[in-house]
Amino acid sequence: MRKINLGIIGFGNVGAGVIKILREKKALLTEKIGIEINVKKVCDKDIVSKRNVSVDKSLLTRNPKDIIDDPQIDIVVELVGGISPAKEFIVGALNKGKHVVTANKALLAQDGQELLSLADDRGKNIYFEASVGAGIPIIKSVREGLVANNFKSVYGIVNGTSNFILSQMSENNCSFNQALKQAQEKGFAEKDPTLDIEGIDSCHKLVLLTYLCFGKFVKISDVFVEGISKISAADVCYANEMDLQIKLLAIAKKEANDLEVRVHPTLIPKSSLLASVSGVFNAIYVDSDLAGDLLFYGPGAGQLSAASAVVSDIVDLTQNIKAGLFKPTLNIVQDKTIKNLRNTDDFESKYYIRFMALDKPGVLAKISGVLAKFGISIASVTQKEHCKAHAVPIVMIIHQSKERNLRQALATINRLDVIKEEAVAIRMEEI
């Protein structure tokens, strides 16, 4: 029986999970694909610490060249994360005629086009199912199962840390800082959670989803990104009262001939399927022309969830090697109806706005007057109970408005002497 040799660079949580699955499911996988998948070498800076899977010491190395330069290794699995030296490992593997499996969304978002082009030139593949949604098979589903579809929009809850925090705030009436502390205590958030709570991780995943669904590699800098660190318990409470839920959404959607790409806290109806996605779970909603509306749901992190996706890629590549096939990774076709990336100023949305204003006659008239000046129409307004001395929350829902007009209006309103705090604005989507 033919044997396919793997080299794994990165023996952390996911790397250990990959070895665990390949070992425990070896008989099943061999029976299914008719090839033995063999882990020939495992590389990590730390080859001493104990993992939840044991590896023969003869397989361990600290030198990645022992994998990259080994002519017997067919597939390199890169699981170190980050930009460098991960990029050098992938480039080296491709140049040595090896296929690559990775979960590295940050690197692919930054340099994916370059790396995929290199893979194509070398007649090799980069597979990256685990880079978006961990074990949720979104990439294969879009690339293969929905190959005949054109896409109108993609909405993703793709960061479990942020979703856990917002879920805790909504379900347990706690503050952002309290929810973040709980996430850190449970191991759902890093000591420095910036990548998660400020939307950066979601942005990386959105770049990949945009490429898969619309055939366009957008730059990270082209994505509008706003995190959840400024979301208050009061806003979560008011949202609940209006039967709305706040979620950090990664959004890519076509508007006429423009493509919008943005990550930000978003108010959605509680009747939406995405609104029911709580805790560390992820979900990706796609609107396609043939298959209609689809929701992909599951754990977006975790050792075995992510490792399952990595193993799936390994098996796909193994079958291609067995059949002597090469299917270019760059088989994504750009949606030629998309002419431009829409500028942030031209985004249009309904908005939730909360002002903290003095409780005195004429305040509402001043606020609505400024909004009217900028062509912004109010759908509803509610004055809440006092929560600070001499200040009262005023919550408005405004009709579809341009981002530029709203920002200009809020900048003017924030300067009014009756306004005690900077206004909070949260975009709304009907999903």
Image (cartoon, grey):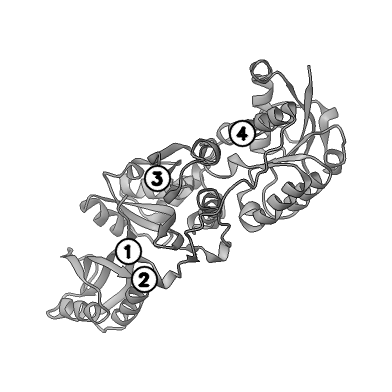
Q: Are marks 4 and 2 in contact (CB under 8 Å)?
A: no
Kind of residue indicated by mark 4 = Ala
Q: CA distance from mark 4 to mark 1?
A: 38 Å
Helix, strand or loop at mark 3:
loop
Kind of residue indicated by mark 1 = Ser
**Seen in the image, is 264 located left or right of residue 234?**
right
**Residue beneath disc 3:** 289
Name which of mark 1 and mark 3 comes first in the sequence.
3
The residue sitting at 37% across, 46% down in the picture is 168
Helix, strand or loop at mark 4:
helix
Which mark is nearer the camera, 3 or 4?
A: 3
Q: CA distance from mark 4 to mark 2?
A: 40 Å
**Residue beneath disc 1:** 349
Q: CA distance from mark 1 to mark 3?
A: 23 Å
The residue sitting at 69% across, 27% down in the picture is 319
**Residue beneath disc 2:** 403
Which mark is nearer the camera, 4 or 2?
A: 2
**Residue beneath disc 4:** 307
Kind of residue indicated by mark 3 = Asp
Helix, strand or loop at mark 2:
helix
Q: CA distance from mark 2 to mark 1?
A: 8 Å
Name which of mark 4 and mark 1 comes first in the sequence.
4
